[in-house]
């Protein structure tokens, strides 16, 4: 879509529409859910609740990913960067749909805080974007690095027999590593250590609350 042909109001409506779709849980995957290839393992009630908490955290992470890629893509200066953000954004939408589907299978729900997380991430992405393409790409690299580490920790925490959740998390992890590498290849600047630390604290607050609500 050539944004320069649209008025700010058009853009605002397009962004608001995307935001509402994400918050309402209307996500369509372009690839099949990796969990479909796995057998449903027997989970105790406590394990099922634990898996649901972890997958709700991952779903919130993907809500934030949508907000970040939408806001950062909005202000990207080059066509190459916009194309990469669109491609990554599509894969993040797969993640959003897969985690929502798994939550549903686990008899649970997405986070009630999603609108808040979306708004916060959108604001953050906008700040990163106005600092310029190199810094914006650097922010993507650091975000994907932290998400990848977080997903790896979930592979330790998920019940071993929850093969469906594990298959989803494993594929997400592969994709996030690629997103980070692609952003790096486009000329990312190093994110300053204090910013990295703030991002990490924000991530902890997000994961700490989304596990429960
Ligand atoms: Fe993702
Ligand atoms: Fe990603």
Image (cartoon, rainbow, N blue to C red):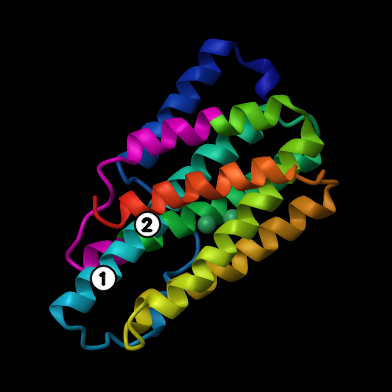
Label 1 sits on residue: 50
The image quadrant in which ligand 2 is located: bottom right
Residue 120 in magenta?
yes
What is the x, y in percent for residue 10?
Answer: 52, 16
Which of the two labelled residues, at mark 1 and mark 2, occupies the earlier sequence position? 1
123 with respect to 50 (left or right): right
State which quadrant residue 109 falls in. Answer: bottom left
Main secondary structure of the magenta stretch: helix
The one of 176 and 44 positioned closer to us in this rendering? 44
Q: Where is residue 17 in the image (x, y as percent from the top left)?
A: 41, 29
Residue 142 lies within the magenta run: no
Range of magenta residues: 101-123
Q: Which residue is drawn at 27% across and 88% down?
A: 41
- Label 2: how many residues lie within 10 Å, few (<14), some (14-19) or many (20+)? many
Task: Identify residue for label 2.
Answer: 57
Q: Callout 2: helix, strand or loop?
A: helix
Report the residue at 62% width, 50% height from top: 143
Q: Which mark is residue 182?
A: none
Image quadrant where one finds the N terminus: top right
């Amino acid at each position: 879509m050539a944004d320069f042909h649209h008025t700010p109001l058009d853009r605002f409506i397009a962004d608001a529409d995307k935001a509402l779709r994400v918050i309402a849980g209307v996500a369509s995957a372009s690839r099949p859910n990796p969990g479909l290839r796995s057998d449903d393992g027997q989970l105790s009630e406590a394990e099922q609740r634990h898996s649901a908490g972890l997958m709700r955290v991952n779903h919130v992470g993907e809500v934030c990913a949508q907000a970040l890629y939408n806001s950062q893509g909005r202000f990207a200066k080059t066509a190459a960067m916009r194309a990469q953000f669109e491609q990554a954004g599509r894969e993040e939408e797969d993640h959003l749909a897969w985690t929502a589907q798994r939550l549903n299978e686990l008899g649970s729900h997405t986070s009630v805080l999603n609108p808040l997380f979306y708004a916060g991430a959108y604001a953050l992405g906008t700040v990163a974007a106005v600092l310029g393409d190199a810094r914006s790409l650097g922010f993507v690299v650091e975000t994907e690095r932290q998400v990848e580490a977080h997903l790896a920790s979930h592979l330790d925490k998920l019940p071993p027999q929850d093969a469906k959740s594990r298959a989803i998390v494993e594929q997400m992890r592969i994709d996030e590593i690629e997103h980070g590498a692609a952003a790096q290849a486009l000329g990312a600047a190093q994110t300053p250590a204090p910013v990295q630390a703030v991002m990490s604290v924000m991530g902890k607050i997000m994961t700490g609350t989304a596990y429960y609500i």
